[in-house]
Image (cartoon, rainbow, N blue to C red):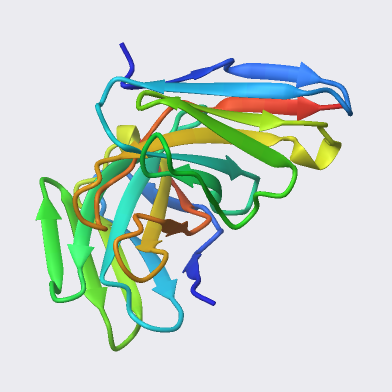
């Protein structure tokens, strides 16, 4: 089984709909992250959480919200989806010891907003 | 602002040759750089980390260098194989302190032909 699991893997929806992407992990890591990836661009950080009571905005948080329901679960919501939020979304985790820990990624959610 | 720049053009090489990918960064040298591999439809997978005070790091057929004068890291794959075909991402730490935030390059796609 995958250490970082994202659901759904693919989603097509319409403008204005509310969407939730879910991420769960079995690595026991405290830190979790949400990124989006667009063609020709690097991964960009949306939100991150260093523990259950900690939520921080990344560089592109507008239009998104998150919830850290437990150490193992971190969900991303689009309250009212718009077409330019069409992208590949990744969840990642890392250990909390030191600033140079590698990140462990799920396989992504491909989101299309019509 | 801190940036990571990778050659967006795909690199095509023959099996058995050494592949060399370039990563340039701006502003101050990061404390470390990480390299990830990403296959189509999959999340990035961590390969190697090199610290600012390390000139070179090796892992099996992989070698990474860190030149703070040139503000550049080189990623080498020796005796390349078709299975090495993927996109390779160069990543730097994104901030001061123990934040765990990363800044990703857009990646360079490597194609190894048999």
The percent position of residue B68, horizontal first and vertical second, equals 27, 83
Could you tell me if residue A55 is visible in this image? yes
The percent position of residue A104, horizontal first and vertical second, equals 33, 36
Q: Residue at x 40, y 49 (%)?
A: B88
Residue closer to the observer: B83 or B95: B95
Residue closer to the observer: B40 or A73: A73
Q: Residue furthest bottom?
A: B69
Q: How many marks?
A: 0
Q: In which quadrant of the rendered view does residue B93 lie?
A: bottom left
Q: Quadrant for the C terminus of chain B, please.
A: top left
The percent position of residue B90, horizontal first and vertical second, equals 39, 58
Position above or below: A54 against A28: below
Q: In which quadrant of the rendered view does residue A20 lie?
A: top right
Position above or below: A33 against A72: below
Q: Residue furthest front?
A: A53
Q: Residue at x 81, y 32 (%)?
A: A81
Please indicate whether residue B50 sits to the left or right of residue A63 in the image.
left
Residue closer to the observer: B85 or B79: B85
The percent position of residue B103, horizontal first and vertical second, equals 46, 60
Could you tell me if residue B85 is visible in this image? no
Q: Quadrant for the N terminus of chain B, please.
A: bottom right
Position above or below: B79 against B94: above
Q: Residue at x 38, y 83 (%)?
A: B28
Position above or below: A4 against A48: above
Residue closer to the observer: A66 or A43: A66
Q: Residue at x 14, y 68 (%)?
A: B56
């Amino acid at each position: 089984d995958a250490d970082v699991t994202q659901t759904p893997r693919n989603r097509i929806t319409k403008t204005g709909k509310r969407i939730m992407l879910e991420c769960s992990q079995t690595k026991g890591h405290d830190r979790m992250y949400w990124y989006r990836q667009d063609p020709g661009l690097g991964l960009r950080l949306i939100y991150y959480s260093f523990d259950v009571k900690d939520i921080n905005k990344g560089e592109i948080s507008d239009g998104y919200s998150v919830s850290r329901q437990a150490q193992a679960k971190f969900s991303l919501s689009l309250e009212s989806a718009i077409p330019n939020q069409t992208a590949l979304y990744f969840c990642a985790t890392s250990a909390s010891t030191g600033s140079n820990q590698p990140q462990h990624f799920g396989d992504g959610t491909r989101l299309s907003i019509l | 602002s801190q940036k990571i720049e990778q050659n967006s053009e795909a690199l095509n090489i023959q099996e058995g040759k050494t592949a060399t990918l370039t990563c340039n960064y701006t502003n101050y040298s990061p404390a470390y750089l990480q390299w990830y591999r990403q296959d189509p439809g999959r999340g990035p997978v961590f390969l190697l980390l090199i610290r600012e005070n390390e000139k070179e790091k090796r892992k099996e057929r992989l070698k990474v260098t860190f030149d703070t004068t040139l503000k550049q890291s080189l990623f080498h794959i020796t005796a390349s194989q078709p299975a090495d075909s993927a996109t390779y991402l160069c990543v730097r730490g994104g901030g001061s302190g123990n934040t765990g935030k990363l800044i990703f390059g857009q990646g360079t796609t490597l194609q190894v032909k048999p």
